[in-house]
Image: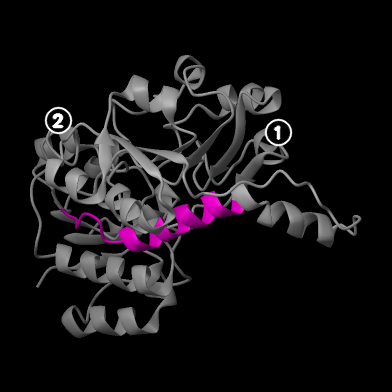
Amino acid sequence: MPKVGVACHFFYNIAEMKAELLAKYPDAKFAPDGVNYMDRGNYIDLFKDCDAILAAIRPIMDEEMLRALPNLKVLACCSAGLDHVDPAAFNKRGVKVGWHAGVNKEAVSEFTLGLILDVLRDISLSNGAIRAGKQWPMRGSAQLLRGKTVGIHGCGHIGQALVKLLQPFGCRILANDLRDFPDFYKQYGVTPVSAEELWAKSEILSIHLSKNSTTRGLYGASVLDKLRPGIILVNTARGGIVDDKALIPRLKSGKIAYAAFDVFDGEPNLDRELVTLPNMLATSHLAGLCEQSLIAMSRAGINGITDNWLPKPGVYPFD
């Protein structure tokens, strides 16, 4: 039986999942004072003798970390993405990854729809004004989602779940993805377009891309300037896909009417200038976190201890 280290906070906070893990791996190793999975030094000290680690999204698992964890054979990931995994380093050292795609797609897609409706209908704006004791706010600038052109950049598990949620609103849905999903597009009335057309025509643009070498910094100044004027930009994917610094002047000018982000580069350390702008709705990387999705991600991690594979750079999900 492998020696399992528990680096994912789900198992520290959800008694049901801790019990389920211990039923299979009774000697699983927990941090004595609660998990500190973002600290590389503590992580190494605690798990250097483990064969398998139940992992969250931090720390970044690169060549240096793998050298410091000489016994590691499997990283079982309790996460929606794998941007914390260096596939070249894992492949070189023969360390496998356990991971299940789309495990929290319902949670993220529902949250994304919530952000869109919040921005369109001034929900948080009104609540903030009331809490601040301001006069009853009546802006009259709210918009319906119905009939809007919604662009989805990345139409995999989460993007497709969002498409399904948008069906009752009669939106025109545009999508861009490296992969093609013709049957899905036909069934749900999605129009596949180039990235340039997506940027130019979307009134609301929701990012659902994986974070990798091709998408880091993709939404820099040059791409942000290609977006339709007055667009609402939503990011529930990963921080670092959008250049936060480049976003600030475009929000200030109104070129981008509103941004709703759940993820930021450098989180949990946030750019205060960005997140306090009146047309920025910021949340704390919680789109994928609800009771049902946490349990699903925990189980995916447990299953990943035995159901795993050797990563290959440039091959899905590392494309």
- Colour mode of the rendering: one colour
Look at the numbered disc 1 and give the secondary structure of its residue: helix
* Residue under the image location 68 percent in, 55 percent down: 124
Left or right for 32, reference 73: right
* Residue under the image location 9 percent in, 62 percent down: 307
Vertical relation: 171 (above or below) 92: below
> Residue 214: x and y, percent?
28, 25
Which residue in the structure is indicated by mark 2? 314
- The residues tagged by marks 1 and 2 sit, at their Cα atoms, a distance apart of 36 Å
* Residue under the image location 90 percent in, 59 percent down: 133
Vertical relation: 185 (above or below) 246: below
> Residue 246: x and y, percent?
57, 22
From the viewer's side, name the closer residue of 150 and 125.
Answer: 150
Magenta span: predominant SS is: helix
> Residue 310: x and y, percent?
8, 46
Vertical relation: 305 (above or below) 27: above
Q: Looking at the image, can residue 88 be seen?
A: yes
- Please report the bounds of the magenta region as a residue range: 98-118
Task: Tell me the crowding category of disc 1: few under 14, some 14 to 19, or many 20 or more residues within 10 angstroms, Cα based.
Answer: few
Left or right for 293, reference 264: left
From the viewer's side, name the closer residue of 130 and 22.
Answer: 130
Q: Quadrant of residue 75?
A: bottom left
From the viewer's side, name the closer residue of 256 and 238.
Answer: 256
* Residue under the image location 55 percent in, 47 percent down: 268
Vertical relation: 151 (above or below) 95: above
Residue 273's mark?
1
Quadrant of the rendering where the N terminus is positioned: bottom left
Task: Tell me the crowding category of disc 2: few under 14, some 14 to 19, or many 20 or more residues within 10 angstroms, Cα based.
Answer: few
From the viewer's side, name the closer residue of 92 and 172.
Answer: 172
Left or right for 24, reference 39: left
